[in-house]
């Protein structure tokens, strides 16, 4: 299966560090913990995604998406 980068939001009332530790144990390779917004960024095999969603304290598991904006001054704004 393919490895995919994921964004995991932490549900209110749960410690982000505890959730990150549990996600790591469930197979997520934790890359960043964004405490200010309650999101954990990591990668794992796509087949593990459902198991990550079952971890206590996880609000949602979504694929990371790349957004590109045109440079300032371009015709498309």
Image (cartoon, rainbow, N blue to C red):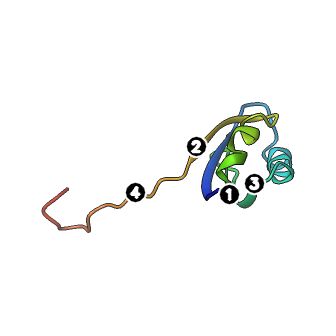
Instruction: Tell me how far mark 3 sits from mark 1, CA to CA.
Output: 6 Å
Q: Which residue is mark 1?
A: 42
In percent of width and height, residue 7 lies at 61, 49
Q: Where on the picture, by quarter, is residue 66? A: bottom left
Q: Which residue is mark 3?
A: 28
Q: Which residue is mark 2?
A: 62
Pick whichever, 34 or 43, lies toward us.
43
Instruction: Tell me how far mark 2 sits from mark 4, CA to CA.
Output: 15 Å
For the point 75% across and 60% down, the residue is 29
Q: Are marks 3 and 4 in contact (CB under 8 Å)?
A: no
Q: Which badge, 4 or 1, is on the more N-terminal residue? A: 1
In percent of width and height, residue 47 lies at 69, 47
Instruction: Tell me how far mark 3 sits from mark 2, CA to CA.
Output: 13 Å
Q: Which badge, 3 or 4, is on the more N-terminal residue? A: 3
For the point 60% across and 56% down, the residue is 4
Q: Nearer the viewer, mark 3 or mark 4?
A: 3
Q: Which badge, 3 or 1, is on the more N-terminal residue? A: 3
In percent of width and height, residue 36 lies at 65, 49
Toward the front, the furthest residue is 1
Element under label 1? strand
Q: Where on the picture, by quarter, is residue 77? A: bottom left
Instruction: Tell me how far mark 4 sits from mark 1, CA to CA.
Output: 18 Å
Instruction: Tell me how far mark 1 sits from mark 2, CA to CA.
Output: 11 Å
Element under label 4? loop
């Amino acid at each position: 299966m393919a490895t995919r980068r994921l964004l995991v939001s932490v549900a209110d009332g749960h410690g982000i560090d505890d959730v990150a530790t549990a996600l790591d144990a469930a197979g997520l390779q934790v890359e960043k913990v964004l405490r200010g917004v309650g999101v954990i960024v990591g990668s794992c095999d796509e087949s593990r995604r459902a198991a990550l969603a079952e971890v206590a304290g996880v609000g949602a598991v979504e694929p990371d998406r790349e957004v590109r904006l045109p440079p300032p001054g371009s015709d498309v704004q």
